[in-house]
Image (cartoon, rainbow, N blue to C red):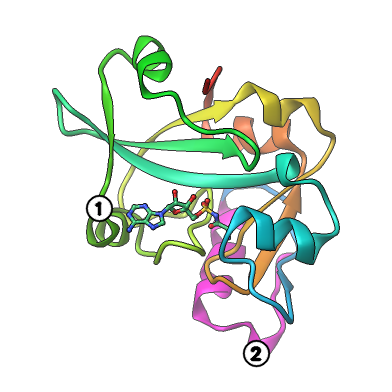
Amino acid sequence: MNEPAPDFGRGAARVAAAARDLGLEITVVAMPASTRTAEEAAAACGCSVGEIVKSLVFRGRTSGRPYLLLVAGSNRVDEKAVAGSIGEAPTRAAADDVRAITGYAIGGIPPFGHATALTVFIDEDLLGHGRVWAAAGTPFAVFAVDPRALATAVGATVIRMG
Ligand code: 5CA
């Protein structure tokens, strides 16, 4: 069931199509309240903040390469710790850069289906859950997914974020 309802908007429709291309079974869910932040998404989904996937865009300070970090909503990225895993220090991308790289605005960035190819890392803490929730292209839409299926589908390397 990857077809969104007609009123979901283009962002959610693009996410549903990208999931289908990756062979992921997802159902995009429109929420009546904002899911812009991890805390808001957890409240809307009725789950813990740790079960929310934050899709955060960084650039390598040396290479300028864009990286996508899929981080548990309850965790903060320790840039020094993550540098050891990705091979260079990461720096947070500016909002307009994030938009150009992903094709989505902050608050609705999905974990796949971006405008450009990104090297992806996933927080090992997310894999401690059977199901997690991620943004579906807008700050009012989410989808649930098995974190292991998500990691496999996007080719993510599992790392500690803190
Ligand atoms: N829909 C929710 C839950 S899935 C969501 O997208 N959460 S998020 O964490 O992935 O996106 C919000 C994040 O964007 C915040 O944690 C914050 O770190 C980041 N952010 C907010 N404003 C900016 C900004 N101006 N520049 C770069 N990053 C920002």
Is 14 colored magenta in this rendering? yes
9 lies left or right of 104: right
| Residue 72 visible (yes or no) | yes
Picture disc at residue 85: none
Quadrant (top left/top right/bottom left/bottom right) for the N terminus? bottom right
Report the magenta stretch's main SS.
Answer: helix
Kind of element beneath mark 2: helix
Q: Nearer the viewer, residue 115 or 55?
A: 55
| Residue 1 visible (yes or no) | no
Q: Specify the amino acid type for callout 1.
A: Ala
- Of all residues shown, which one is farthest toward the top? 84
Residue 153 at x, y percent in the picture: 60, 37
140 lies left or right of 79: right
Residue with the mark numbered 1? 94
Residue with the mark numbered 2? 7
On whether ligand 1 comes within 8 Å of the CB at mark 1, the answer is yes
Mark 1 / mark 2, whichever is N-terminal: 2
160 lies left or right of 91: right
Is 109 colored magenta in this rendering? no
Which picture quadrant has residue 41?
bottom right
Q: Nearer the viewer, residue 84 or 116?
A: 84
Where are the magenta residues, as a range? 1-21
Q: Compute the Cα span from label 1 to label 2.
A: 30 Å
Residue 38 at x, y percent in the picture: 62, 53
On whether ligand 1 comes within 8 Å of the CB at mark 2, the answer is no
Q: Specify the amino acid type for callout 2.
A: Asp
Q: Are marks 1 and 2 in contact (CB under 8 Å)?
A: no
Within 10 angstroms of label 1, few (less than 14), some, or many (20 or more) residues?
A: few
Tag count: 2
Name the residue rendered at 41%, 19% in the picture.
82
